[in-house]
Image (cartoon, rainbow, N blue to C red):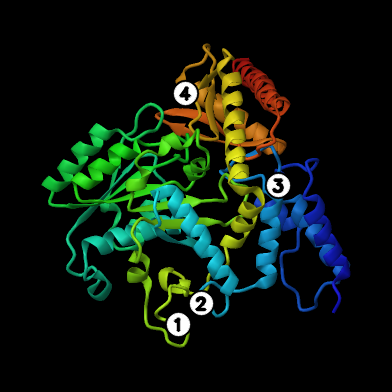
Amino acid sequence: MEYTTIKNKIISLINFGIGKENKLRGAKTPKELINEFDFSIGKDGKSQEEIVAIIDDIISNSVNTNHPFFMNQMYGKQNTMAIYGDILTTLLNTSMYTYEVAPMMTLIEKECIAKLSKIVFKTSGDGVFTPGGSISNMMGLMLARNAKIKQVKKEGLTNAPKFSIFLSDQAHYSFQKAAIFMGFGNDSIVKIETDEIGQIDVNALQLAIEQEKQNDRIPLLLVGVAGTTFSGVYDDLANLAEIASKNDMWYHVDAVYGGSLLFSKQESIKFIGIEKADSVSWNLHKMMGVPLICASFLTRQKGLLNEAFAVDADYLFHDTEADYDLGQKSLQCGRRVYALKLWLTWKHDGEIGFEQRINKLMEIAATFAAKISAKNNFELLCQPESAIVVFRILDFDLDAGEINNLNKMVRDKIFNEGEILFNYAEFKGKIYLRCVISDPELKEEAINKIICKIEETVSFVKKQIESSFISLNV
């Protein structure tokens, strides 16, 4: 059967994208979408023309994450070559468990892992691509457990002592999920307070470690964050490495967001100490414009992944001598090819192109932050350490609670209008707005437009508040 109409539609989308003129999102509720769109699967199929109409409906009611003004999450504007790589991945449609069915993809993944691990550890390490940073972080916890309990693969946790996992209160929630999933429980998580910009308090960490030892718990894992989800700041990775070594802990660095700054010589100073990590998680879809998902898990020591995950499955794994059946070092069996889109983009752009992309993103973030700092009605949390600009609206006529409410109301109004998307979060009792820069071609005029839109919305929201206050007192 020829799918000419559908094929032409998809080719058009590949060639021209979703378009900047499209709204980033519609402000429809789940109930509205359910009422407007037929989600059911019927007995009879649909024609090509009907499917094209359905595709148009899907696009118009989806979030346009490829838009320059999509700043809501830590990914966005895609690299065209990476899109081609993702399409090729789908067309080739193979799995990453054996060299037999993925010869080129196996060698491509091994090359990417070798290069990424060399960037991180300054020497050859090991690693594998994963379905996301949460799984990478879970694998870090698993290797930490295996290092501490040699017999765990055979005997499990039945006779295991109580362990403690140390991380900042700004670390990703995936570690908590991992602790629950792996049987350590919520009680194993020890959250350490952070300073005024979100970096872990080293003194508080050392006190917490001693306290856990006194409570007869064994320090198992220390997590350093290289680019927090909230503010994008970096922990003192070198200091944490020393603390982990001193206390015989596995040292894992969550560089899921910030790792890509390693491509830049001028930014890599933030990573001093990461080379001492036992494991690192790094997502390339976060800053590099590679379509979701492109996540890696790296280890400094070779062989640990095979020790942790290799099992006897002779119906699948036949060559036990060579390190080419990557399924033996993965948590998964069937695994999509994640490396091709990265490798193809890297081949096209080169090391210089990757460095230029990061430097551009950081320049845009610095420009954005400078413009915010110059305004009396805004307060910048800190100078951006990655491509995230965090700030809040100020109003000296309002108390702290009212300022928080104002920031949230302004963001919600702009978000629901669907032309500019950014997020917000509460940090130390204050609501902050956060714009994640993912488009290296974002112009200064666009930054001015965003700031102007926020200021206009502040005026609108304040008038609404004042008018509501007046009507309540009439």
Q: Marks 1 and 3: which is nearer the front? A: 1
Q: Are marks 1 and 2 in contact (CB under 8 Å)?
A: yes
Q: Helix or strand or loop: what does disc 2 sit on?
A: loop
Looking at the image, is mark 3 or mark 2 earlier in the sequence? Answer: 3
Q: Amino acid at mark 3?
A: Asn
Checking the image for residue 98, the label placed there is 2
Disc 1/disc 3 C-alpha distance (Å): 41 Å
Tell me the residue that label 1 is attached to.
317
- The one of 1 and 342 positioned closer to us in this rendering: 342
> Badge 3: few (under 14), some or many (20 or more) residues near its Cα, within 10 Å?
many
Q: Amino acid at mark 1?
A: Phe
Disc 3/disc 2 C-alpha distance (Å): 36 Å
Tell me the residue that label 4 is attached to.
401
Q: Is residue 261 visible?
A: yes
Q: What residue is shown at x 50% (from left), y 33% (from top)?
A: 266
Q: Quadrant of the N terminus?
A: bottom right
